[in-house]
Amino acid sequence: MSKAGTFTVEDFAGAVEEVIEASRTFPSRSLDEFLRAVWASFGRHRAKAPSWFLFAQLMKEGLSAPPAQYDETWSGVTKYPANPWFSRPDLPESRLPPPFGNKNLDAERRRPTELQVFEQTLLFLISDLHSMLRSGSAPSIDGFSWDSPRGHRWQHWELVEFLDAAERGLWKPVEDGWIVRATADRCGWAALAVFLHLGMVYE
């Protein structure tokens, strides 16, 4: 934590590393269970203002809180939602959605809220991973990727690797200002949506 007592993105990264180490020590929680536990925890905290401190709390509770039971209606979330708060969707190494081109991003940001983008991102990850586990599909022969039955490619499907990739991938978008309103000491729900999606796709 900074001298002024502000919980920063660096503190958030440190909390994620603690969760990674804890999951290595007690490797009983799967990524599926982790994401569903984050969803359950989010339901208890959704009225709070987004912050790196709150996001760290969600990550910790993802490891300790009881996972939400899978809701079959979530299976209807089949696509990663557009995140108009991510100002560089053409970033090659993160494979985030295609650029918005000439679209008016201010207009796009008035349609879904950041909270809704986060909700849909988390539900997409939960439902797509669920489809993989239920179908009996398997990773590629080289073990470097796993395509879901819906055609989405996962680079990481184990909890430790997922969180490690998400943490590594988040630094540049935050430092370079690619996530609207996300800085070292403040953030919106869109930043956590980017973080979680990076866990899936960042190499």
Image (cartoon, rainbow, N blue to C red):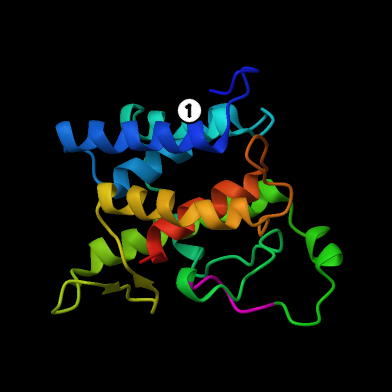
User: What secondary structure do most residues of the magenta stretch adopt?
Assistant: loop
| Residue at left offset 81%, top offset 82% | 102
Q: Please name whichever residue, 84 or 88, is drawn nearer the observer in this view of the structure.
A: 88
Q: In this view, does 134 lie to the left or right of 36?
A: left
Image coordinates of residue 47 in percent, x first then y, are 67, 29
Image coordinates of residue 26 in percent, x first then y, are 16, 32
Q: What residue type is labelled 1?
A: Gln
Label 1 Cα neighbours within 10 Å, binned few <14 / some 14-19 / many ≥20? some
Q: In this view, does 179 lie to the left or right of 145?
A: right
| Residue at left offset 45%, top offset 59% | 198
Image coordinates of residue 128 in percent, x first then y, are 39, 64
Image coordinates of residue 12 in percent, x first then y, are 49, 34
| Residue at left offset 53%, top offset 35% | 55
**Count of marks, rendered view:** 1
Q: Which element is circle 1 on?
A: helix
Image quadrant in which you'd find residue 202: bottom left
In the image, residue 80 sits, relative to residue 164, either above or below, namely: below
Examine the rendering and report whether any part of residue 73 can be seen: no
Magenta region: 95-99
| Magenta span includes 101 | no
Q: Please name whichever residue, 147 or 95, is drawn nearer the observer in this view of the structure.
A: 95
| Residue at left offset 49%, top offset 31% | 11
Q: Please name whichever residue, 52 or 28, is drawn nearer the observer in this view of the structure.
A: 52
Examine the rendering and report whether any part of residue 12 can be seen: yes
Q: Is residue 44 left or right of residue 202?
A: right
Which corner quadrant holds the C terminus? Answer: bottom left
Q: Mark 1 points at which residue?
A: 57
Image quadrant in which you'd find residue 62: top left
In the image, residue 117 sits, relative to residue 19, either above or below, namely: below
